[in-house]
């Protein structure tokens, strides 16, 4: 570390902040790149929308676990220990997700992906546990603005990840390497992990604000878990983070099923978020954090509603993405800034608990959005055409399986055939289950039918090429419809957030306007800190 850029305490503020910003890239990539490969994962591992939602949710649950369990001890262990834990968790999580490749088509593949996602999430959470209180400690006079700058690197990283994923998919095969395959998209995450490790880990870290002020940890904990407004902010954070991260995981996949380049719309959305956060200063000064959060809630709900209405059309979907981006851009950093500025005695505990609780609930919402999508999917499945596909599988695939079993053990014969017995068994098993339900109940089951059609799409049987195209033509519009219905169910939740921050904004105006609070001063309307 260059001593010329360090302060009297040996703290290199600029490099620490820059390293923390780069450390958000693995988190951003885990959303952007994974969002672009959901279709591959669904077909290669034969997963339902709910399964994919649970894997996506596992990343958030991992974040929640690390944040909630680290929060009470962060003042003791320090920010450097948390950053080191983040680095190794990221390395292990990415490696574990990649190892799932060897379990494709096997039910255990789902659990390997799930566990890897949780550990990746733990790394993401530890970076949040480090970066947010560290930013507040490094810039005590400009907390909300600098926290917006810090969190600009999350959507900024998602833009980089989304465009990288898009171009890798468009390039496809590069010699013997398929750049579009999901394993390459995940492996890219190693790059920012090693960069931020080299930038951050050799440095000296500052103490948190409460630790620097000598506030006992037990006082910080007691204040955080007993202050009613602090607790309400934690509850509201659960809602706002769900509104941001839950839908953003599904947007690329839903749009891809409508024939739109979902990752390009996603890149536009996240690019706007990054720009808005970088230029948050005028919004903070003109509207105050509470006014910003009120408008953010209204715009977020409107954007989700538009996504649920617009089935196709690039310009319409870009408009929906723009409205949604103007809403969710300020949710995360401005809420953290509000907590730190108005309730500084909650310290890193309040910040980290708020983010952790939000991650836990938003992970649950992702799974529930998948459940909603599966529930509505049969409404958009053309029954006659879907049943025709299932019956063709029933008639033809046993013969394909017989040929593969006869060729088993003969490498040349299997190479000439072009598929393995396991490729066909998965299709037959899922197809039998879906058809049995239809014949018994007289209706199509969303998860079962979706799995059967995805199994057909993932089959490598050359003789079934036309059937795969027919299965895709049936499934994709139905998946798009189910996803849009999930957006419609989630949109009204934003009204709860709008009402809460409207109340805070009006209260502040009556008391003379919003003002930040320093440790040892009086909080307006809330008593002594």
Image (tube, rainbow, N blue to C red):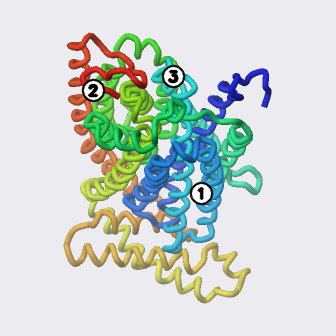
Is disc 2 surrounded by few (<14), some (14 to 19) or many (20+) residues within 10 Å?
few
Could you give the CA–CA distance between mark 3 and mark 1, rounded to whole angstroms? 34 Å
Could you give the CA–CA distance between mark 3 and mark 2, rounded to whole angstroms? 21 Å
Number of callouts in the render? 3
Quarter occupied by residue 10:
top right
Could you give the CA–CA distance between mark 1 and mark 2, rounded to whole angstroms? 44 Å
In the image, residue 470 above or below residue 497: below
Question: Which of marks 2 and 3 precedes in the sequence?
Answer: 3
Q: Nearer the viewer, residue 346 or 422?
A: 346
In the picture, the disc for residue 186 is none
In the picture, the disc for residue 527 is 2
Q: Where residue 146 appears, x then y in whole percent? A: 52, 23
In the image, residue 486 above or below residue 207: below
Direction from residue 404 to residue 325 in the image, left or right: left
Direction from residue 353 to residue 196 in the image, left or right: right
Q: Where residue 515 appears, x then y in whole percent? A: 35, 16
The residue identified by callout 1 is 93
Q: Give SS at disc 3.
A: loop
In the image, residue 149 above or below residue 102: above
Q: Give SS at disc 2.
A: strand
Question: Which of marks 2 and 1 precedes in the sequence?
Answer: 1
């Amino acid at each position: 570390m260059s001593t010329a850029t360090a302060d009297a305490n040996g703290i290199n503020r600029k490099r620490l902040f820059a390293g923390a910003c780069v450390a958000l890239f693995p988190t951003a990539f885990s959303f952007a790149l994974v969002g672009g490969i959901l279709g591959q994962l669904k077909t290669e591992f034969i997963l339902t929308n709910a399964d994919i939602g649970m894997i996506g949710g596992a990343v958030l649950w991992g974040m929640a676990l690390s944040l909630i369990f680290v929060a009470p001890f962060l003042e003791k262990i320090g920010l450097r220990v948390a950053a080191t834990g983040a680095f190794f968790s990221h390395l292990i999580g990415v490696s574990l997700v990649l190892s799932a490749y060897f379990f494709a088509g096997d039910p255990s593949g789902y659990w390997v992906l799930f566990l890897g996602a949780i550990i990746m999430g733990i790394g993401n959470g530890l970076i949040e546990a480090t970066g947010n209180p560290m930013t507040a400690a490094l810039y005590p006079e400009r907390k909300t603005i600098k926290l917006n700058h810090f969190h600009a690197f999350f959507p900024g990283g998602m833009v980089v990840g989304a465009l990288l994923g898009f171009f890798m998919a468009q390039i496809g095969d590069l010699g013997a390497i398929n750049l579009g395959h999901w394993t390459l998209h995940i492996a890219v995450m190693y790059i920012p992990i090693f960069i931020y490790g080299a930038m951050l880990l050799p440095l000296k870290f500052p103490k948190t604000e409460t630790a620097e002020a000598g506030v006992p940890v037990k006082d910080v904990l007691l204040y955080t878990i007993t202050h009613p407004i602090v607790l309400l902010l934690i509850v509201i954070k659960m809602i706002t983070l769900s509104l941001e991260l839950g839908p953003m995981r599904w947007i690329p996949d839903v749009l891809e099923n409508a024939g739109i380049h979902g990752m390009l719309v996603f890149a536009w959305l996240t690019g706007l978020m990054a720009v808005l956060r970088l230029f948050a200063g005028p919004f903070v000064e003109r509207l105050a954090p509470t006014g910003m959060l009120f408008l953010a809630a209204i715009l977020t709900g409107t954007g989700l509603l538009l996504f649920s209405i617009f089935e196709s059309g690039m310009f319409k979907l870009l408009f929906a993405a723009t409205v949604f981006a103007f809403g969710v851009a300020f949710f995360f950093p401005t809420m953290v800034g509000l907590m730190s500025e108005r309730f500084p005695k909650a310290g890193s505990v309040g910040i980290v608990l708020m983010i952790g609780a939000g991650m836990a609930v938003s992970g649950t919402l992702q799974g529930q959005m998948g459940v909603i999508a599966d529930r509505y999917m049969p409404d958009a499945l053309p029954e006659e055409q879907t049943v025709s596909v299932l019956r063709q599988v029933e008639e033809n695939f046993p013969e394909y399986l017989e040929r593969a079993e006869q060729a088993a053990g003969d490498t040349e014969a299997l190479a000439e055939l072009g598929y393995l017995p396991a490729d066909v068994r998965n299709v037959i098993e899922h197809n039998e289950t879906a058809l049995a339900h239809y014949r018994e109940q007289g209706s199509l089951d969303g998860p079962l039918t979706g799995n059967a059609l995805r199994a057909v799409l993932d089959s490598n049987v050359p003789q079934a090429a036309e059937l795969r195209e027919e299965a895709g033509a049936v499934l994709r519009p139905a998946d798009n419809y189910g996803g849009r219905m999930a957006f419609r169910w989630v949109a009204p939740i934003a009204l709860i957030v709008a009402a809460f921050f409207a109340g805070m904004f009006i209260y502040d105006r009556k008391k003379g306007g919003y003002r930040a609070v320093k440790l040892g001063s009086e909080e307006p309307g809330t008593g002594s800190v």
